[in-house]
Amino acid sequence: MVACLVRVLRGEFDECPLGDVALWGRPSALFLSEAEQRSLWAQGVDPWEGKP
């Protein structure tokens, strides 16, 4: 499973094997707990982009 996720993050498949391309070809992965995500949204910051 880890190898598959690494290949998705690196964009190493011919096509994205997932239904959502949000992680496709990302240079790095980020984990946010639900509480961290809610806190950032409450501050007006997009937790995945780091922008208002």
Image (spheres, grey):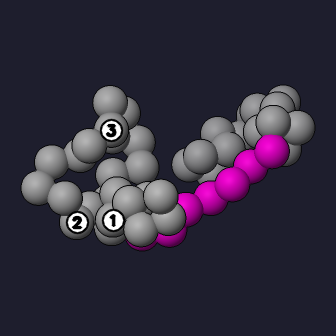
In the image, farthest residue toward the front = 1
Q: Does label 1 or label 3 sit earlier along the sequence?
A: 1
Q: Residue at x 55, y 62 (%)?
A: 29
Mark 2 Cα shell of 10 Å, populated few (<14), some (14-19), many (≥20): few
> Gap in Å between the C-alphas at discs 3 and 2?
13 Å
Residue at disc 1, secondary structure: helix
Mark 3 Cα shell of 10 Å, populated few (<14), some (14-19), many (≥20): few
Q: Amino acid at mark 1?
A: Arg
Left or right, residue 5 beside residue 18: right
- Point out residue 15 in the picture as x, y percentages from the top left corner: 15, 48
Mark 1 Cα shell of 10 Å, populated few (<14), some (14-19), many (≥20): some
Q: Residue at x 42, y 49 (%)?
A: 23
In the image, which disc is placed on residue 12? 2
Q: Residue at x 22, y 66 (%)?
A: 12
The residue that disc 1 covers is 7
Q: Are marks 2 and 1 in contact (CB under 8 Å)?
A: yes
The residue that disc 3 covers is 18
Magenta-drawn stretch, dominant element (helix, strand or loop): loop
Q: Does label 2 or label 1 sit earlier along the sequence?
A: 1
Q: Is residue 6 visible?
A: no
Q: Is residue 17 visible?
A: yes
Q: Amino acid at mark 3?
A: Leu
Look at the image and give the residue range highlighted in magenta.
26-33
> Gap in Å between the C-alphas at discs 2 and 1?
5 Å
Residue at disc 3, secondary structure: loop
Left or right, residue 18 beside residue 12: right
Of residue 14 and residue 52, the one placed in the foreground of this image is 14
Q: Quadrant of residue 27?
A: bottom left
- Point out residue 42 in the picture as x, y percentages from the top left corner: 84, 30
Q: Amino acid at mark 2?
A: Glu
- Point out residue 46 in the picture as x, y percentages from the top left corner: 64, 39
Q: Does label 3 or label 2 sit earlier along the sequence?
A: 2
